[in-house]
Image: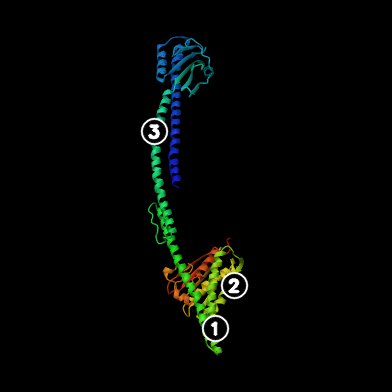
Amino acid sequence: MRIHILLLIITAGLIPVLVSTFLLLNEYENKAMDKRLNELQNQGDLLSKLILPSGYLSGAQDNTINGEIERISEIFHGRILIVNSSLNIIKDTYGLEEGKYLISENVIQTFQGKSSKRKDSKNDLIFVTNPIVHNISKEIMGVIVMNFSTKDIQTMRDSLEKKAILSFATLTILIMVCAVYFSRKLTKPLTSIVYSIDHLTEGYMDEGVSIKGFYEIEKISDSFNHLIGRMQKLERSRQEFVSNVSHELKTPITSIKVLADSLLMQEDTPVELYREFLVDIAEEIERENKIINDLLSLVKLDKTAGDMNISIVNINELLEQLLKRLGPIAKKKNVEIIYESFRPVIAEVDEVKLSLAITNLVENAIKYNVDDGWIRVSLNADHKYFFVKVSDSGIGIPEDALDNIFDRFYRVDKARSRESGGTGLGLSITKNVIQMHRGAIKVYSNEGEGTTFNVRIPLNYIA
């Protein structure tokens, strides 16, 4: 990652500078050339206005015109030829071709009314031809041919290019230094996180991660510490669960053994005592069976999370059946179950799994309710979801326990849960089932004021 950041900073910093420098140098050269051509064109127009009325094209010498031609030639460091309509060279600032004839494509085209401007980048020259036009007849009486060097422009460009290269080299060094610094600064916190993770894998779970740097890095550090805390809590819950389940599984067996031994040690035991002991043994077996069933349900949900037997179910009828089945349990504590249905609801669900989830909620409402209390179960729906609310008048849940009640193996009141036969798996099973239906569950509770569970499940199953 550090190498990638280093290359990214260098590339992002140098390539735009290199491209812009190249474009600017070319832009300077082109504009300088165009400016020179326009200046020569203007000078040619001025000369043509001086030459035409003076008779210069007919061979008459004019020191003023000669001086002006020489002046322009010296200023722009070039050569000027004056050609008359017979293609005879009247004036050559180099003094080499006077009296000779100049037959060239550019001169002939200029006599035909086509002025020319041409660059010769290879030899650093520019060529300009200007017609000398009669003011009245508009006849082309002659041509001014100008050849000038552009070495001064090229020299300036080379000078600018050297300065640009020097600046580019300096900027390259500066960017590389900054790239090395920032790549190290950016990756150092991540390296620290990797080190901390390696340290944790060695078993140092009690040590958190404290990394200072950018806001996002600190958030990663905080999230990682939160994850460690969560893992520690789950580990403690797991250990506690193993201890609790070992005790829960052992207690009924111990009771059964004690009862059976008691019967075996007595001779001529009355039938009534046999019956009483057998009832107790049956209750202990039922208690053992419930613990095992809860464990098997949780394991089955984990291993077959994708195995959903979806069918179209009448939710109203399903809730009525579940509440009817749980009615006798509620009557033992004199708890009244109130069912409210606001509309018919048909949904695509796994009937067995959903029944297990709702049953757990209602059973918990019965277990942790007060005598002569009440439970209110309501069903409603909109165009997308159906909603099940289970409220009770029970003992409630402490605020500090609300975030943990869906954790596996977690029990708010361990002693009371054990007395009521709870294993701490019911709500975890319920949440798993609801999430498998792509739904959500929320809990609202105050200690001593009862509890409300809100369940939301899509009407149409989302695979």
Residues under numbered marks 2 and 3 in contact, where contact means CB atoms less than 8 Å apart? no
Give me the C-alpha separation between circle 2 and circle 3. 86 Å
Give me the C-alpha separation between circle 1 and circle 3. 100 Å
Question: Which of the two discs, 2 and 3, labels the residue nearer the N terminus?
Answer: 3
To which quarter of the image does residue 352 belong? bottom right
Q: Is residue 154 left or right of residue 114?
A: left
Q: Which residue is found at the position 54% from the left and 81% from the top? A: 281
- In the rendered view of the protein, which quadrant contains the C terminus? bottom right
Dot 3 crowding, Cα within 10 Å, few <14, some 14–19, many 20+ = few
- Vertical side of 455 occupied by 30: above or below: above
Question: Which of the two discs, 2 and 1, labels the residue nearer the N terminus?
Answer: 1
Residue 364, percent from left and from top: 50, 74
Q: Residue furthest right?
A: 311
Q: Amino acid under label 1?
A: Val
- Residue 166 badge: 3
- Vertical side of 350 occupied by 13: above or below: above
Question: Which of the two discs, 1 and 3, labels the residue nearer the N terminus?
Answer: 3
- Vertical side of 93 occupied by 347: above or below: below
Give me the C-alpha separation between circle 2 and circle 1. 35 Å
Residue 282, percent from left and from top: 55, 81
Q: Amino acid under label 3?
A: Leu
Q: Which residue is mark 2?
A: 317
Q: Amino acid under label 2?
A: Glu
Q: Which residue is mark 1?
A: 279
To which quarter of the image does residue 449 belong? bottom left
